[in-house]
Image (spheres, rainbow, N blue to C red):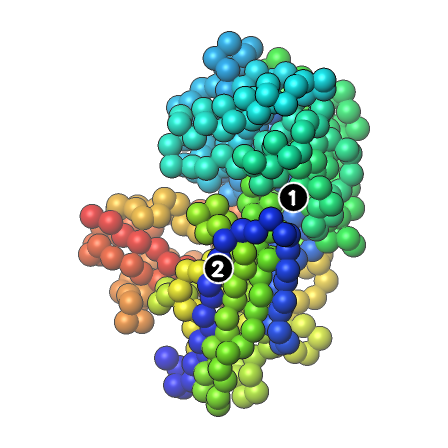
Amino acid sequence: MKNGILLIVLFSVTMLKSSGFSQTVETPYEIGTWLGFRPVAVSYTFDDGCANQFAVAIPMFDEFNFKLTLFTVTSPTWETPPDWEKLQAAADSGHEVASHTVTHTSFTGMDDETQEAELKDSKEHIETNVVGHHCITMAYPYCNVGNRSICKKYYIAARGCSGQVEKSTPTDFMNTCCFLCGTNHGVKTAQHFISKCESGINSNGWTIFLIHGIDDDGGYSPVTSDVLRESLEYLDVNRDTYWVATYRNVAQYIKERNSASVSESFADDNTITVQVTDTLDNELFNMPITIRRPLPDGWLSADVTQNGHAVNKRVVEIDQVKYVMFDVVPDSGNVIITKSEDTPVQHMGALTNPVPSASQNFPNPFNPTTTIEFSLPEKETVHLSLFNSLGQMVKEHFYHELAKGRHRITLDASDLIAGQYICKLQIGSFVDMKKIIVSK
């Protein structure tokens, strides 16, 4: 602990109720509309299992450390039958494998019994063949919405095709909006993609894209890989504006954010205990949510841990007020905010002035190497170091000046014992600390 002052925040979560959302957040706490208090969420969804979704899109998204959703038809007789090995690899890398039903048949005029079989069996096929991952969202074939009450039995959200930016809380989770993309539709160019992303800023909306083919893979209404790349490059340099995430993760975040209740249960000069509860099933709803509060009087900065481990956090200044802002998973242990003197403060100015950003290392746990990705809005000195659970530096791995752009550092931990460490990445005045686990 620095200066011996602690702020303790206790988070807990209960089960989902059918009665809906009930958020109550005591002053001075706030929950971000989107992760990191970004103005817009963006999801790229891909239908039908077209070849270049695997050969082109997934490697491209991995390059930028963005994640996409693959709405999958599960029948082996479908024109592009599921490649379960590739789908497993995609899911293991953080992409979402979700349902596009068993046979890709229209729900228009379909009886309830057949609809239920399509929804239930598709979910079971995916969870059987993509081991270790839940299938909790789906997309309606041909955009023909079915019986919502049946769909809701198996999925937390379903994608329709109404052609507009979705609200920060959808009116109907069983028929969320999206934009159809490619040569047959209105979103064809990179500027089309960018304008749809920008159109969500004022409303704090959720922009969802629907893509089938890429280049010449034979898929419906193809998007060129150059257009796809240019749209991702734009989002990459504007990471403080856009949260790019899978369809599932955004839906999870919305439901967690809207169901959270935050209240202080104890406070004195040194500690504050806060209860955060919601009404969700922890097994299905385990996304971090972003919370912030003003720093107490006399605090210049703060460090944050949850259940003894460092979490993604920033200290920001907004309208001359300093906040500690952090991402925590409800019901995952105590969050401790510790007074600090040396963590830089980010001044949250215009959205067009991006700040450095860093992603969680992958893989994690790892042995002996892992990759850390980050972006620089301008040339900066980058310093990467590792600390043990006692706060002692055990490795100074990297100290160089790097050019503007996206970078990767490979961390070799072959000289360290197995265990948990804190990876500190300092980029100019920006500091990011994340938990990494070395396995042997």
Q: On the rendered image, what quadrant is the N terminus found in?
A: bottom left
Residue shown at the point (71%, 58%) measured from the top left: 351
* Residue type for callout 1: Val
The image quadrant of residue 101 is top right
Above or below, comparing residue 387 to residue 413 in the picture: below
* Residue type for callout 2: Val
Residue shown at the point (56%, 79%) measured from the top left: 295
Viewer-proximal residue among 93 and 13: 13
Q: How many marks?
A: 2
Viewer-proximal residue among 260 and 329: 260
Q: Position of residue 409 (x, y in %)?
A: 40, 49
Q: Position of residue 213 (x, y in %)?
A: 63, 20
Q: Position of residue 81 (x, y in %)?
A: 50, 15
Disc with the residue nearer the chain's start (1 vs 2): 2
276 relative to 409 in the view: left or right: right
Q: Secondary structure at mark 1?
A: strand
315 relative to 170 in the view: left or right: left
Disc 1 target residue: 42
72 relative to 89 in the view: left or right: right
Residue shown at the point (78%, 54%) measured from the top left: 202
Mark 1: give few (<14), some (14-19) or many (20+) Cα within 10 Å: many
Q: Position of residue 47 (x, y in %)?
A: 60, 25
Dot 1 and dot 2 residues touching (CB under 8 Å)? no
The image quadrant of residue 305 is bottom left
Above or below, comparing residue 106 to residue 242 in the picture: above
Residue 209 showing in the rendered view = no
Disc 2 target residue: 13
Q: CA distance from mark 1 to mark 2?
A: 26 Å
Q: Secondary structure at mark 2?
A: loop
